[in-house]
Image (spheres, coloured by chain):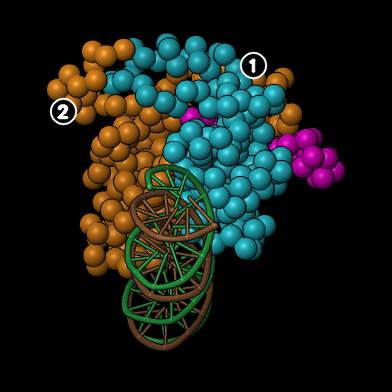
Chain colours: A cyan, B orange, C green, D brown
DNA sequence: CTCTAATTGATACTTGATATCAATAAATGT
DNA sequence: ACATTTATTGATATCAAGTATCAATTAGAG
């Protein structure tokens, strides 16, 4: 019943679709295959550009199925299109570089502990949460040669 | 230099615009006035509907100025248009009801403490963060008369 | 009251994403 | 292998949120 897990700890995308009763087709394999090739988070438009032979509608539909299946995380960026990343089995959160947009992950048990302590403070049932940390990543810090590093 | 604070702890919206060197106009007053009337978070389209005599472009522009000024928080909702709420002086986070979309606030010092402990784990400089808790609010819990409450 | 620059808002456009629907392909039964 | 049924595809139209354009208007300084 549980979705297939591959060694890396992520969910196998094709199987995730099959588990939902969806057919295994060439178009869907192209989409899941491309996503698995990518290391970084991506947008729907990225995939459309990478897969010119797959229709936009199919790309968007497949992404939606994968999100519904829990195999992809949808990351709402402040402006523009949301990004997607392969969901790991263990719950985690994301870092987003405000300069280059690179998305990373982290997991931290304290975050979950905080949630539990918030239950009394919040007027309703907690059904989920989302946390993003905005950073300037190592690479981008390297780019700006010591600018703004000294003054406060 | 600091933006004017009114008793409630929120930033005065008209003054926030003036502090940025923007003129005080009838259209902008209509927008800020309407926002201040609202208790809840709102979308840009909400404002446009409430203010049919103010052009869409002006509504969107004014919201953008207010966000830039730090007088409004922009809350990216998972699907659809982002919502905005008046920024309080003290840092806080939001709860979003997954049934009715109602937005609430909470503040919790532990969240900030978690962030500090994450600094070692994260490869870059933390420049900001965002946390949203998804809930079923009290009102919506009342609606669904005990459904799904018993089974596991 | 005049002048200048900021502002406005109708309109057209851009972007991201979904709906439609005839053509196609996958699974199933024989 | 073939026919049948049903899911899937993708070109196209459409939708929704938001931005760019630009002539007409208005605020504020002098």
Classify A51 as above or below A87.
Answer: below
**Disc 1 marks which residue?**
B117
Label 1 sits on a secondary structure element that is helix
User: In percent of the image, x 17 and y 26: which residue is there?
Assistant: B144
Cβ atoms at labels 2 and 1 below 8 Å apart: no
Provide residue B104's location: percent of width, then percent of height.
32, 30
Q: Which of marks 2 and 1 is in front?
A: 2
Magenta range: A130-152
B1 relative position to A128: left or right: right
Is B30 left or right of A80, judged from the image as shown?
Answer: left
How far apart are the alpha carbons under marks 2 and 1? Answer: 40 Å
Between A139 and B146, the residue placed more toward the observer is B146
In this rendered view, identify the residue nearer to me: B67 or A34. A34
Q: What crowding class fits label 1: few (fewer than 14 Cα within 10 Å), some (14-19), or many (20 or more)?
A: few
Label 2 or label 1, whichever comes before in sequence order: 1
Q: Does the magenta stretch include residue A140?
A: yes
Give residue B129's quadrant in the image: top right
Q: Nearer the viewer, residue A71 or A77?
A: A71
Which residue in the structure is indicated by mark 2? B143
Residue B36: say if magenta.
Answer: no
x and y, in percent, of residue B85 in the image: 36, 41
Classify 10 Å Cα crowding around label 2: few (below 14), some (14-19), many (20 and above): few
Instruction: Kindly identify the residue that appears in the image at 45 percent across and 27 percent down.
Output: A129
- Residue A29 visible in rendering: yes
Q: List x then y, in percent, for residue B72.
A: 42, 44
Vertical arrangement, residue A2 with respect to residue D20, above or below: above
């Amino acid at each position: 019943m549980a979705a297939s897990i591959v060694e890396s700890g992520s969910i196998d995308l094709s199987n995730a679709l099959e588990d939902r009763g969806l057919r295994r087709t060439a178009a869907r394999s192209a989409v899941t295959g491309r996503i698995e090739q990518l290391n970084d988070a991506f947008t729907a438009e990225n995939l459309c550009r990478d897969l010119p032979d797959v229709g936009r509608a199919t790309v968007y539909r497949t992404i939606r199925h994968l999100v519904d299946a829990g195999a992809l995380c949808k990351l709402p960026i402040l402006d523009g299109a949301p990004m997607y990343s392969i969901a790991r089995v263990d719950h985690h959160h994301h870092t987003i570089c405000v300069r280059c947009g690179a998305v990373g992950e982290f997991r931290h048990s304290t975050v979950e502990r905080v949630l539990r302590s918030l239950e009394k403070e919040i007027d309703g049932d907690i059904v989920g949460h989302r946390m993003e940390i905005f950073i300037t990543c190592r690479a981008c810090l390297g780019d700006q040669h010591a600018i703004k590093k000294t003054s406060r």
